[in-house]
Image: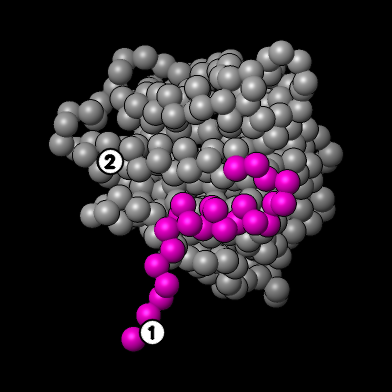
Amino acid sequence: MPRHELVTIDHHILESQKLHPEATGEFTNLLYDIALAAKIVAREVNRAGLVEILGLTGEENVQGEEVRKLDVYANETLIRMNEFTGRVCVMASEEDPDIIPAHPDGKYVLIFDPLDGSSNIDYNVSIGTIFAIFRRKTTGDSCSVEDCLQPGRALAAAGYVVYGSSTMMVYSTGHGVYGFTLDPSVGEFLLSHPNIRSPQPKYYSVNHAYVRRWSRGVQEYVKWLQGEGDDAPELSERYIGSMVADFHRNLLAGGVFIYPSDAKRPQGKLRLLYEAAPLGFLAEQAGGYVSTGRENVLEVQPTSLHHRVPVFVGDRRLVEKAEEFIQRYDVEGGT
Ligand code: P6P
């Protein structure tokens, strides 16, 4: 049995700092802070069924979605871990309508979805945290929303934590994608998936219940994914309703995840800053591609913190095929 070197995420982050000669250690420490926050959230997620943390807080978030206590806990943990370190000048979260000012000396911007797929909490389905790190843009005394409204192409790093049968943290600083599995007995994330590259696709992920709302181009594309057409792929359908879990499976096994715009959601459902762009950045780093169906998601200029976009992400050929069908059947600017 070959012996693998045991590499902790802290060690890996420190090593990757050498790829950034200009790095001062601030960026490295910010990634440490996120990894620690992930461990804290993982502990609560794994205890959720035992400490009556399940159920609703009775409040709603900016998305009008019922807020579950673990959402609140994860949100507060990420904010507390980064508010006073001096590394982050401003944060933004799915759970908060406006920016969350941090430290005026911070050089980085942290944007996150603290617990994506949280509607699955009560059914023990995998859920996840998604994070995006940008460099500060403004030079004034304090950061502003302008520091948050950056396209995915400007990302300094992005990643997610998936709380499933095991807890994994997957991240990239633009030099490949690396996955770490939490060993709860020692409280360390250990390198388990070095330099992830997505293989030939096996799966496609979409909520078929919305088929009647989709544009003709998306309907024809999904038929192609199901095997209609001489050049159609042979795929299985997997959709769990938790984007981090669906994305993680497709990243490792090969596939495409799609959440198109439709007649009810002309901008789509998923948010650019803390879902589509960070996951699309990882997909691209693993050899894939991310599109709105008409353009590269990473080139889209956010117009607000909770800007929504249609998402086609994963295997490059499958995503480019979506663009072809939409180009062929849909009018520009239609859903
Ligand atoms: P639907 C969870 O609320 C989420 O934002 C993603 O994690 C998930 O992929 C999607 O929405 C599921 O949405 O409309 O298929 O239930």
Position above or below: 162 against 142: below
Foreground residue among 168 and 260: 168
Q: Is residue 75 left or right of residue 218?
A: left
Specify how the rendered protein is coloured: one colour
Locate residue 89, reporting x and y percent. Answer: 62, 23
Locate residue 188, reporting x and y percent. Answer: 35, 53
Q: Earlier in the sequence, mark 1 or mark 2?
A: 1
Locate residue 139, reporting x and y percent. Answer: 77, 21
Position above or below: 78 against 189: above
Foreground residue among 32 and 286: 32
Q: Kindly identify which residue carries mark 1.
A: 2
Quarter-of-image position of residue 90: top right
Q: Which residues are magenta?
A: 1-25
Q: Kindly identify which residue carries mark 2.
A: 43
Q: Is residue 243 visible?
A: no
Locate residue 189, reporting x and y percent. Answer: 39, 54
Q: Residue at x 73, y 32 (%)?
A: 150
Q: Is residue 7 left or right of residue 176?
A: left
Asked whether 18 falls inside the magenta stretch, the response is yes
Quarter-of-image position of residue 99: top right
| The N terminus sits in image quarter | bottom left
Does the magenta stretch mainly form a helix, a strand or a loop?
Answer: loop
